[in-house]
Amino acid sequence: MYAYYLSKGHTLNSLLSLSFTEKLFYVEAMNYMIEQEQEKYKAMFGK
């Protein structure tokens, strides 16, 4: 999760200070975005 959000411009300190619930939200949001990207590539390349 940290590598994903650091590359999006978040600071390590801001990520480390998140509550457990906030971290869960960030992880699920990350997973959702990855799934969306995968669907986009499947549609583009037919795999």
Image (spheres, rainbow, N blue to C red):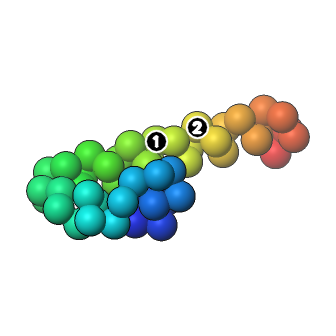
The image position of residue 25, as x and y in percent, is 26, 46
Q: Is residue 1 above or below residue 41?
A: below
The disc labelled 2 sits on which kind of residue? Gln
Left or right: 35 in relation to 22: right
The residue at 71%/35% (across/down) is 40
At numbered mark 1, what does the secondary structure look like: helix, strand or loop?
Answer: helix
Q: Is residue 22 above or below residue 16?
A: above
Q: Residue furthest right?
A: 45
The image position of residue 26, as x and y in percent, is 32, 49
Left or right: 31 in relation to 44: left
State the quadrant of the C terminus.
top right
* Circle 2/circle 1 CB separation < 8 Å: yes
The disc labelled 1 sits on which kind of residue? Tyr
Q: Nearer the viewer, residue 34 or 42?
A: 34
Q: Nearer the viewer, residue 10 or 2?
A: 10
The residue at 39%/54% (across/down) is 10
For the residues labelled 2 and 1, the Cα–Cα distance comes to: 6 Å
Q: Which residue is mark 2?
A: 36
The image position of residue 29, as x and y in percent, is 38, 43
State the quadrant of the N terminus.
bottom left
At numbered mark 2, what does the secondary structure look like: helix, strand or loop?
Answer: helix
The residue at 64%/42% (across/down) is 37
Q: Which residue is mark 1?
A: 32
Left or right: 34 in relation to 41: left
